[in-house]
Amino acid sequence: MSEREVPTTETPGKAAQKHHWSLTLLGIALILGFVYYGELVLAVLFFAILLSFMLSPVAEALELMRLPRAVASFIAVVLLLGLLYGITSVSYNRAEIFADNLPKYSQKIRSLLKPFRQQAERLERTSEEMQGPDSKDVIRVRPATSWTDMLTHGFGSITDDLLAASFIPFLVYFLLTWKHHARSATVMLFKLEHRHTAFVTLGLIAKMLRSFIVGNLLVGLFVSALSVAIFGLLHVPFFYFIGILSGFLSLVPYLGVILAMLPPLLVGLGQLESPDLLIVIVSVVGLHLFALNVLYPKFLGSRLKLNPLAVTIALLFWGVMWGAVGLVLAVPITAAMKIVFDHVETLKPFAAWLGE
């Protein structure tokens, strides 16, 4: 037998395994591409799902008053829109008052920042002197992206964002109205032997999302109440508004503690003394750590069951994929994935890796 006629030693099983892995990698690549480029549609859908779970108890309570499901869902959505309008109106009015009072202490803010600006200019001149006169001819390359670019990824023009957001109330209404139909129809998509597992999985995801929303609301209210009390004792301007804003900004994953510091520092920089500003910083950090290590495990730990490493990787992944929106949705999406993995035999090792 010649060399050209020597048969291959690769078994059919190995060829099938390579074929299987190639299809798996192709499928993962297609899913990642769909998630990345379909951010706007998927984000709108996920926010609508979260809001529908939040309003579901309201609609069910209205149904107990013998109202039809459609009418109860409509009233729940109208109440949500009214609440959002009230919050936006109050926030806008507070912002206008703050803007009107800003010139009163803007000079003091500039005087406080003057030493830092002078130090930065001195360091810049020293750097230029060390580089020599030829450094002026060097082309400075600016990074193509920054953390602000990453966080604003997926945000288009105001018109596009408002158009996308306008679909959320309608999606929430239909999700509330067709809740039972959507759940049963989703279960019917699976084979008969898998329908019970699918039904249980959807129920656990629903409980997790409801607990996530209620838990975050309770934590936000608790942190906001303490922030208002502390800022009021320190005489922070607009302490009642700034405290609530800081308390709920603290809920933002990864960047929460930084975002929570900004409102009290901005309004207090020209009004408070240095010791009071330090107390503000310490109190914001302390409340954030208390919420993260005590309140979150109490209200959310039993439902999410995600280890800190998995949460950090999820925040990084979804932050890169969807920016700020991804940071907000990373935890519930990952927790829902873990529930699915728990009920699929071949994916249980991944669920164990994500779990505590």
Image: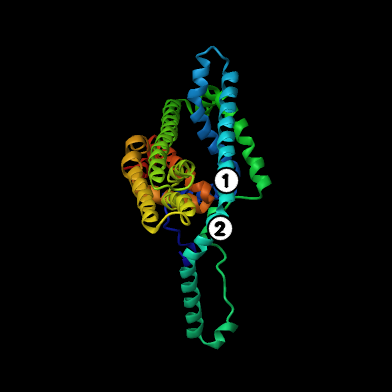
Instruction: Read off the residue under disc 2.
Output: 149
Q: Amino acid at mark 1?
A: Ile
Residue 102 vertical placement versus 333 (above, below): below
Task: Pick the residue in front: 323 or 19.
Answer: 323
Q: Amino acid at mark 2?
A: Asp
The N terminus: image quadrant:
bottom left
| Residue neighbourhood size for the residue with mark 2, other residues' Cα within 10 Å, grouped as few (<14), some (14–19), many (≥20) | few
Task: Pick the residue in front: 106 or 353.
Answer: 106
Answer with the quarter of the image where residue 163 lies: top right
Which residue occupies 42% across, 32% down?
A: 214
Q: Secondary structure at mark 1?
A: helix
Residue located farthest toward the front when viewing the structure as drawn: 104
Instruction: Read off the residue under disc 1.
Output: 97
Q: Is there a contact, CB below 8 Å, between mark 1 and mark 2?
A: no
Q: Nearer the viewer, mark 1 or mark 2?
A: 1
Q: Residue 32 location in percent, x, y?
A: 53, 49
Residue located farthest toward the right when viewing the structure as drawn: 159
Q: Residue 88 location in percent, x, y?
A: 58, 39
Which residue occupies 57% across, 73% down?
A: 141
Residue 304 vertical placement versus 111 (above, below): above
Q: Residue 112 location in percent, x, y?
A: 47, 64
Asked whether residue 247 appears in the rendered view, the answer is yes
Task: Pick the residue in front: 255 or 319.
Answer: 255
The C terminus: image quadrant:
top left
Query: Quick one: label 1 or label 2, which is nearer the N terminus?
Result: 1
Q: Secondary structure at mark 2?
A: helix
